[in-house]
């Protein structure tokens, strides 16, 4: 069946719409269990496609997560860590091949509208990485003078780019969600009118704090500003889907909706939820790395399915490459083709022999094989026992929480409550060996390993050879 689908796809490769939210939690959609507000368009998208309940990011933080999505590589391989700010002098290397470049090589028009966060200096901007169009912000929307925890002078005014030009600073963030949706819709219409297949990357800056919503969206959820923001994102999904239907390209367009990491829990009523998964953004527990994911492609992806097969953001690039007939990058990547999983084929298994979860400046904190996840000893931040923030002011994390070597069976315990390490010594040894293999290749800050396959990030002024 898959070969038949691929042969049909190869004769007419799909348009691609990739919607990537910021800090949207696993439990923040009504189809994922959220009851305070509704997300009818995303619920409908799930009913018309497949909803994945075990889709993970490679790192629970902004830049590293985005680097993985767009390159198919663990961020450690690319020397991208954490969240790049306005004072960073590095970014995504021009030697890496992005999803946009793969699409462009196959004749696609490419655009990103929203948040980039892989370098704000000219060599690192989206237009240097395969995107024909870019409008938006180069890093997170809280990296501006109004940050509630930053000292005065820490952040310059937030720039807004059109292409490679800063056209304004301190943009009105109330216009972000609806505005970036409108720009994406315009790009879709223009590409279709020109008879060109398209890759549209809508990288919403929301619901990352500070939260803003348009005047039209203010109060629509009845559940506060967070509910309004998520509802406005949902409205945008509805607008995109209705545009595809209006243009008659609904059944020739793959739409994928997901998030860069879990919710920022210290912000309390301005933070999303994990549907009971442990911890959130900034940790390698499931609440930080497991995110909503919905895929829709009428007539190709079966409707109304829910898949519990594990795959990751690093698998998106090789999967789309397979669908559009593009060769994989020449440099080594970590992602695997998950087409069978995407199509929810019967008996489809995870494409991943193992998964590694890094955080901070290259710390290997957990590894996974199948149902088993081994946490390696590390400290982490938590809000357990701490007072959460409200109204946009965060609470204070406790930064000295510790976990020793611990084994969890994610099939029976996705909440990581029951450490079963003493019951499965052979599994533990297998996962220790997996961890050692990743350390040898990609390094590990916790054990002071450099990694033989790590490549340099892009530098503003590369040293001479």
Image (cartoon, grey):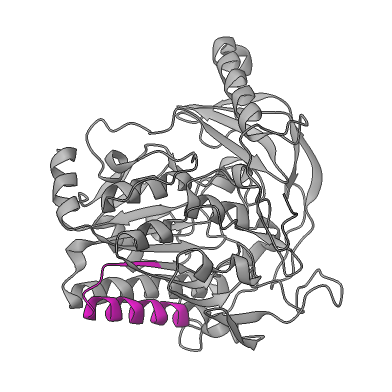
For residue 294, above or below residue 309: below
Residue 260 picture location, percent across and down: 53, 56
Left or right: 44, with 433 as reference point:
left
Classify the position of the N terminus by image quarter: top left
Name the quadrant containing residue 353: top left
Instruction: From the image, give the main secondary structure of the stretch colored magenta.
Output: helix
Residue 186 picture location, percent across and down: 34, 82
Left or right: 82, with 199 as reference point:
right
Residue 188 picture location, percent across and down: 31, 76
Is residue 274 visible in this depiction of the protein? no
Does the stretch in magenta take in 53?
Answer: no
For residue 369, above or below residue 384: above
Toward the viewer: 186 or 162?
Answer: 162
Is residue 139 visible in this depiction of the protein? yes
Counting labels gives 0
Residue drawn at the location 61% of the way across and 52% of the way down: 64
Residue drawn at the location 76% of the way across and 61% of the way down: 395
Magenta extent: 178-200
Name the quadrant containing residue 58: top right
Does the stretch in magenta take in 187?
Answer: yes
Residue drawn at the location 71% of the way across and 58% of the way down: 266
Toward the viewer: 453 or 263?
Answer: 453
Left or right: 357, with 448 as reference point:
left
């Amino acid at each position: 069946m898959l070969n038949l689908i691929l042969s049909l796809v190869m004769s007419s490769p799909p348009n691609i719409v990739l919607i990537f939210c910021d800090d949207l939690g696993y439990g923040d959609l009504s189809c994922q269990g959220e009851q305070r507000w509704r997300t009818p368009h995303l619920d409908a998208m799930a009913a018309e496609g497949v909803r994945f309940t075990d889709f993970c990011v490679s790192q629970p933080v902004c830049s590293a997560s985005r680097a993985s999505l767009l390159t198919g590589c663990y961020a450690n391989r690319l020397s991208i860590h954490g969240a790049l700010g306005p004072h960073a002098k590095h970014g995504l290397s021009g030697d890496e091949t992005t999803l946009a470049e793969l699409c462009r090589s196959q004749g696609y028009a490419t655009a990103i509208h929203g948040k980039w966060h892989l370098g704000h200096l000219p060599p690192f901007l989206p237009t240097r990485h395969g995107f024909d169009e870019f409008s938006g912000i180069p890093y997170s929307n809280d990296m501006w003078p109004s940050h509630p925890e930053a000292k005065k002078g820490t952040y310059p005014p937030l720039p807004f780019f059109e292409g490679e030009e800063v056209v304004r600073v301190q943009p009105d963030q109330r216009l972000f969600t609806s505005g970036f949706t409108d720009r994406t819709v315009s790009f879709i219409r223009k590409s279709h009118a020109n008879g060109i297949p398209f890759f549209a990357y809508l990288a919403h800056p929301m619901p990352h704090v500070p939260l803003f919503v348009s005047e039209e969206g203010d109060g629509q959820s009845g559940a506060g500003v967070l509910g309004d923001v998520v509802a406005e994102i949902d409205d945008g999904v509805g607008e995109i889907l209705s545009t595809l239907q209006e243009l008659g390209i609904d059944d020739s367009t793959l739409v994928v909706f997901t998030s860069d990491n879990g919710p920022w829990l210290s912000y309390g009523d301005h933070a999303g939820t994990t549907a009971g998964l442990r911890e959130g953004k900034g940790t390698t527990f499931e609440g930080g790395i497991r995110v909503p994911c919905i895929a829709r492609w009428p007539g190709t992806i079966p409707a109304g399915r829910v898949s519990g097969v594990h795959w990751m953001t690093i698998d998106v690039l090789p999967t789309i490459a397979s669908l559009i007939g593009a060769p994989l990058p020449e440099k080594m990547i970590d992602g695997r083709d998950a087409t069978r999983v995407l199509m929810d084929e019967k008996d489809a298994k995870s494409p991943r022999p193992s998964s590694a979860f890094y955080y901070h400046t290259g710390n290997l904190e957990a590894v996974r094989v199948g149902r088993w996840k081994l946490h390696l000893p590390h400290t982490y931040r938590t809000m357990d026992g701490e007072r959460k923030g409200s109204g946009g002011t965060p609470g204070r994390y406790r930064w000295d929480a510790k976990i020793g070597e611990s084994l969890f069976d994610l099939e029976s315990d996705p909440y990581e409550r029951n450490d079963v390490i003493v019951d499965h010594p052979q599994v533990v040894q297998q996962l220790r060996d997996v961890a050692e293999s990743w350390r040898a290749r990609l390094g590990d800050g916790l054990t002071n390993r450099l990694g033989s396959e790590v490549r340099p990030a892009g530098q503003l002024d590369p040293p001479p050879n």
